Image (cartoon, coloured by chain):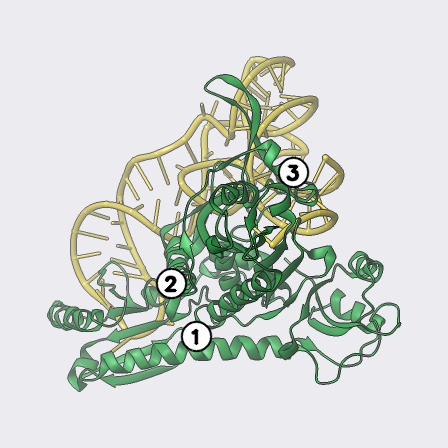
Chain colours: A green, B yellow
Amino acid sequence: MSDEKKLTTRAQDFSAWYNEVVLRAELADYSPVRGCMVIRPDGYGIWERMQRALDDMFKATGHRNAYFPLFIPQSFLNREAEHVEGFAPETAVVTHGGGKELEEPLVVRPTSETIIYAMFAKWVHSYRDLPLLINQWANVVRWEMRTRLFLRTLEFLWQEGHTAHATHDEAEEEARRMLGVYRTFMEDWMAMPVVTGRKTDAERFAGALRTYSCEAMMQDNKALQAGTSHNLGQNFARVFELTFQTESGGTDFAWNTSWGVSTRLVGGLVMTHGDDKGLRVPPRLAPTEAVVVPIWRSDEERARVLAAADALRTALAARVRVHIDARDTLKPGAKYYEWELRGVPVRVELGPRDLDRGQAVLVRRDTGAKQPVSLDTVTMELEHLLATVQNDMLRAARERREQHSRRGNITYAQFRELMDGEGAFVYAGWCGDGACEAAIKDETKATIRVLPDEEFRSAEAPATCLKCGRPSTSEALWAKAY
RNA sequence: CGGGGCGUAGCGUAGCCUGGUAUCGCGCCUGCUUUGGGAGCAGGAGGUCACCGGUUCAAAUCCGGUCGCCCCGACCA
C-alpha cells in the first residue's frame, strides 16, 4: 500500500488531518472565493439531518420559522452601541446596486437581531402578542481574517432563533431552555458531549445581557463553542422601540433572546469522532447508515451474491438508510477503505461463504468489530447495532473528555505547562476580575469557556483564583479554543 | 494585517541552484486476467509549467512585478 493513500495522522498534525478528512471524505471543498467553501453533498447531507432534528425540536418547543432579508440597512446595525462595536469590523457592505451608488449602504447580515427586532416592533402591541417565538434558517457573512473549513468561513449557514417575552424571567427561561435543546441535540444526535454554562463578560455576545454556551472538547483537547443562547435583556427592544401594553395597562419594552448553531457543528463532528482512517459519523446523523459490500470471485458467484445483496438492501431499506456498493471496478478491500474514510457507521459484508451459512457480516466503523448475523434477523440486528454504535460513540467521547479534564488544586505554573503542552479542560477558581482572565489569555491563549452550570462543577468548589490567588467567586472552565 | 510556504496533467509531485519545450505516482480510458482488507499486465488520452514584463539564439528554470491559495499568529461562531 502506498503511503499516499493514507491520511496524515491526528498525532502527526491535527490541523492537517482535519483538512484532509474534510476534503477526502468530500464534505466540502475550497471555492474560488477566498475564505468561502463549497459544502458538497456528503457534508450537506449531514447538515440536512442536523437541520431536520433541530427544526423538529424547535417546533416542539413552540417556535415557527420565518425568513428575513439578507441585507440590513447600515443604520440598523449602528443603533445598539455594543452590537455595532462587536460586528462592524467584520461586516461586508454593499454600496452599489443596479449600477448606482446606494443612498444608504446595506450590510450583509452577520446576524439578524437588528432587522428582526425592527420587525417585531411592528408586530407586537400587547402582552397578548407575547411570547413571539421565531426561528430562521439562513446564511450569514462575517469577514474573518483567517478561515478554516466549516469552523470559520466568511459565509456560513446557521439557524438563529429570536424571541420576545413580557418579562425578564420568561426570556431567561427561554434562553436556558434553548441551551438545553442544543445540549440534547449535541449529545443525543451528534454523540458530542458538551459542558454548558454562562460566558464571562469578555466572551459575552455583543449586545446581550448574558450569554450561555455549549462547549465541546475536540481531539486536540481544544474547546469548540458549539452553540450559544443569549438573554438580550431589553437592549434591542429599547433601540428598536419594541414595546407592548402590559396587562395592567402600562407600557414596557419586550425582553428578547437569540440563539444559534451553525455548519460549524459539522467541523465539530469531524474533530470529535474522526480517526486516522477518516470520518466517523454517528448513525443518527449519517446520510447513509449502512453500506452493503457484496463479495465474489467468479461470474457465477457474482450473479448469486448480487441478487442476494440486492434483496438484502431492499429488506434493510425499510428500516435503515442503506446503500449497496455493487461496483465491479474495485475489490472489496478498496471499498472498505473508501467507506471507512467516508464514515458510514456500519458495513454489511455479504459473500459466497456467508450465503452458504445464511448470514451477513456486520462491521462497526467506530470499533472495527465484526459480527456475523443471520439473514433472517439482519434488519433487527442492524438497527440494534446502530443504536449501540450511537451510544458507544457518545460514551467514548465523554470518556476522552474526562481523561483530559483537570479538577482540583492546580498551580498557575502547572496550568501554563498544561496549556503549552497537550491542552485540557481545566476547572479552576476565578476571582471574577476581567484582568485575571485577560492576563491568562495573554500568557497562555486559554480563555474561560464557561462558568459551568452546577452539574459540571467540581464536588468541592475551588477556593482561590487560578491567577491571582484571591478568593474565588466562581468556578471557571479554562481551555484553548477554536 | 505580520511571518512562512506553495502555484508544473483531474489530484499529488520531480525538474529550478548549474537555461536547451517536462519526471514520477494516483486517478481516467481500452483489453485481458482478477475480486473475503487499497489487484496485475499491456496499450492509451491528458500540460499556454499562475499571470505580466525583462535578460537570452533559447526561460518551468535567471531578474523585476502582479495575482491567488494554504499554513502559523493577532480577531472571531
Give the residue at mark 3. Answer: A79
Q: Is residue A153 above or below residue A289?
A: above
Relative to residue A105, is residue A313 drawn left or right?
left
Q: Nearer the viewer, residue A29 or A214?
A: A214
Q: Is residue A340 above or below residue B20?
A: below
Q: Is residue B9 above or below residue A478?
A: above
Relative to residue B59, is residue A279 drawn left or right?
left
Count of all numbered marks drawn on residues in the image: 3
Q: Secondary structure at mark 2?
A: helix
Rounded to the nearest angstrom, the CA distance separating label 3 from label 1 is 50 Å
Q: Are marks 3 and 1 on the same chain?
A: yes
Quarter of the figure with residue A356:
bottom left
Image location (x, y in percent) of residue A95: 56, 24
Q: Nearer the viewer, residue A220 or A11?
A: A220
How many neighbours does mark 2 have within 10 angstroms: few (below 14), some (14-19), or many (20 or more)? few
Q: Amino acid at mark 1?
A: Asp
Whether residue A12 is visible to the viewer of this picture, yes or no, is: no
Q: Nearer the viewer, residue A178 or A407?
A: A178
Image location (x, y in percent) of residue A45: 36, 56
Q: Is residue A444 above or below residue A105?
A: below
Q: Which mark is residue A401?
A: none
Task: Report the chain holding disc 3.
Answer: A
Q: Which callout, 2 or 1, points to the residue nearer the camera?
A: 2
Q: Amino acid at mark 3?
A: Arg
The C terminus of chain A, quarter of image: bottom right
How many neighbours does mark 3 have within 10 angstroms: few (below 14), some (14-19), or many (20 or more)? some
Q: Which callout, 3 or 1, points to the residue nearer the camera?
A: 3
Q: Which mark is residue A366?
A: 1
Which residue is rendered at x = 79% and y = 71% of the image? A415
